[in-house]
């Protein structure tokens, strides 16, 4: 296929001047819509405006400019079909061999804070999508360019091939073009669905994801991996975070960062969570950010080695110095994520002017989280996708029902509510022991609940005495409470709902333990 005539109609003018000059030097005739034509003319490229071909100026404030048979027939005509080519000639429509289009910035507009529905709708491209689909459909005889990053490669091939593009290049460009329009339409459907209160679980479910970057590896070094970001991007999300320092991120790093952020976002007060293998090994809330960091890491300093650290406040110099001191003790954190990091704190964490033991630590800044961001929790299964609402339940005073003869003291209640928030993010069967706003023992991922209690109690040791316990689901038998009582736990919070609830509560009463039932389960699988 030889390129003799190109149609250009782009919203993003990046690289346009260079491409126009390259095509002009090769003797390719340029046809362009008004804004693109003006940019090409400013770059010194001779260009024919689309209205010269169609006989119509742009209509409806530019909503209609390329939707015309003279343009689409020139793109869609099969070059090998004599009938098609005779019809083109009879209509005096020239064939168009290269279509260069990118779309109105709907995604950027929809992702802007405070955008109105009419503003977003006006950025839904019609003619551009039609041009791309026409050219991609007829890629046997037409090339379609949708990404400025491809301009240089295509121009080089045209130059080396005497204005010809190989079938392989045209096929690759067509696949990319269809992916671009699919993602564009999915972003529109998602935005309008959220704004217009469409079904939360629509059929079909269409999602737009853009590849952000390749990852160092997947769950294991022999597995390749990449991370994709939602379109429009979710402000303040992990996927939209900016990496400020450290080595290339891996698949497992992202999973641990995600778990850590989920915990610290439960708290209004300063909070730090340290994650290993998607479970917390330490969490603390209250006081200053520096003190929360110190308490969370020292809750289980052994397990904190190589962990991911998340905080819910901007890291200042005091917090950065606390991290450096903790690194002397722990030796290694794999990552740190915060809403923001002050410049002087970042200099300290990067090891300037002197080196420090965490030089390879991945440091991310998410920015502020958008309030009320609609989202779904997604998980892949073999051949499909599980979709659910996120577990966003927040306990209200009416949820708290004291089931035992003794009510918790104010201090116990504070620790119970703290432990409950952390327990929600621990892999079930989950048990969290807490004291003074800090975890002292965590049992996770066991196949029976009493086993999780035992792990948490052993980890806490003497710190279990006077601690509060949270359980993500009911106790099926009294044995879990009996194990906690032996360790010295004095208060518990759990959903209730077991057939053995009377026995479980009686066991707590016999030991003088206070117990609150919430009626809410927090399984995390």
Image: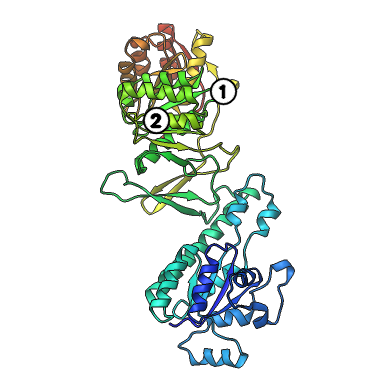
Q: Quadrant of residue 70?
A: bottom right
Rendered view: 223 above or below 291: below
Disc 1 element: helix
Which residue is nearer to you in this view: 245 or 438?
245
Q: Position of residue 429 (x, y in %)?
A: 37, 28
Q: Residue at x 47, y 44 (%)?
A: 239
Question: Where does residue 177 sit, x and y in percent of width and height?
Answer: 48, 67
> Which residue is denoted by mark 2 in the rendering?
353
Q: Position of residue 56 (x, y in %)?
A: 71, 79
The mark lying in front, picked from 1 and 2, is: 2
**Can residue 477 be seen?**
no
Q: Residue at x 51, y 80 (%)?
A: 28
Q: Quadrant of residue 57?
A: bottom right
What coloring was used for the rendering?
rainbow
Q: Nearer the viewer, residue 155 or 189?
A: 155
Q: Say which residue label 1 marks.
A: 399
* 156 on left or right of 48: left
The CA distance from mark 1 to mark 2 is 52 Å
* Element type where label 2 sits in the image: loop
Closer to the chain start, of discs 1 and 2, is 2
Left or right of 17, for residue 259: left
Any part of residue 10 in sight: yes
* Image disc number at residue 17: none
Crowding at label 1, few (<14), some or many (≥20) Cα neighbours within 10 Å?
Answer: some
Q: Is residue 87 left or right of residue 459?
A: right
Outermost left residue: 222
Label 2 neighbour load within 10 Å: few <14, some 14-19, many 20+: few
- The quadrant the N terminus occupies is bottom left
Quadrant of image for the C terminus: top left
């Amino acid at each position: 296929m030889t390129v003799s005539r190109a149609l250009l109609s782009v919203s993003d003018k990046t690289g346009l001047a260079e491409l126009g000059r390259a095509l002009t030097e090769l003797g390719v005739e340029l046809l362009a819509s008004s804004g693109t034509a003006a940019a090409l003319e400013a770059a010194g490229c001779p260009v024919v405006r689309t209205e010269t071909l169609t006989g119509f100026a742009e209509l409806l404030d530019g909503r209609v400019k390329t939707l015309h048979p003279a343009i689409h027939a020139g793109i869609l005509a099969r070059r090998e079909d004599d009938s098609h080519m005779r019809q083109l000639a009879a209509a005096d429509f020239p064939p168009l061999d290269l279509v260069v289009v990118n779309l109105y910035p709907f995604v950027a507009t929809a992702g802007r804070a405070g955008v109105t529905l009419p503003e977003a709708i006006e950025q839904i491209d019609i003619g551009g999508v039609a041009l791309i689909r026409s050219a991609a459909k007829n890629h046997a005889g037409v090339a379609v360019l949708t990404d400025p990053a491809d301009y240089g490669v295509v121009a080089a091939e045209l130059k080396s091939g005497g204005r010809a593009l190989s079938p392989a290049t045209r096929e690759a460009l067509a696949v990319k073009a269809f992916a671009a329009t699919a993602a564009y339409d999915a972003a529109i459907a998602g935005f309008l669905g959220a704004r217009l209160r469409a079904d939360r679980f629509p059929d079909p479910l269409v999602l737009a994801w853009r590849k952000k970057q390749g990852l160092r590896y997947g769950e294991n070094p022999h597995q390749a991996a990449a991370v994709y970001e939602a379109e429009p991007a979710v402000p303040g999300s992990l996927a939209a975070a900016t990496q400020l320092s450290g080595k290339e991120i891996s698949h497992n790093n992202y999973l641990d960062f995600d778990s850590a952020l989920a915990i610290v976002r439960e708290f209004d007060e300063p909070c730090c969570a340290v994650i290993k293998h998607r479970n917390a090994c330490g969490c603390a809330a209250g006081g200053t950010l520096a003190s929360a960091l110190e308490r969370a890491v020292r809750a289980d300093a052994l397990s904190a080695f190589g962990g991911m650290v998340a905080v819910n406040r901007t890291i200042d110099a005091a917090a950065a110095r606390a991290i450096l001191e903790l690194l002397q003790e722990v030796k290694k954190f794999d990552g740190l994520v915060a809403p923001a990091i002050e410049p002087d704190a970042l200099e300290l964490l990067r090891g300037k002017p002197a080196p420090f033991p965490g030089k390879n630590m991945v440091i991310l800044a998410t920015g502020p989280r958008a309030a009320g961001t609609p989202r779904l929790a997604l998980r892949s299964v073999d051949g499909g996708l599980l979709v659910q609402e996120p577990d966003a339940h927040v306990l209200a005073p009416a949820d708290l029902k004291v089931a035992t003869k003794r009510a918790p003291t104010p201090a116990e209640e504070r620790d119970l509510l703290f432990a409950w928030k952390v327990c929600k993010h621990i892999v079930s069967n989950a048990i969290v022991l807490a004291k003074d706003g800090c975890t002292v023992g965590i049992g996770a991922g066991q196949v029976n609940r009493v086993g999780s209690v035992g792990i948490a109690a052993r980890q806490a040791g003497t710190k279990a005495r006077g601690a509060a316990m949270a359980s993500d689901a009911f106790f099926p038998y009294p044995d879990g409470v009996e194990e906690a009582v032996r360790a010295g736990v004095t208060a518990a919070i759990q959903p209730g709902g077991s057939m053995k609830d009377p026995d479980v509560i009686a066991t707590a009463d016999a030991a003088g333990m206070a117990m609150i039932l919430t009626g809410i389960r927090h399984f995390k699988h």
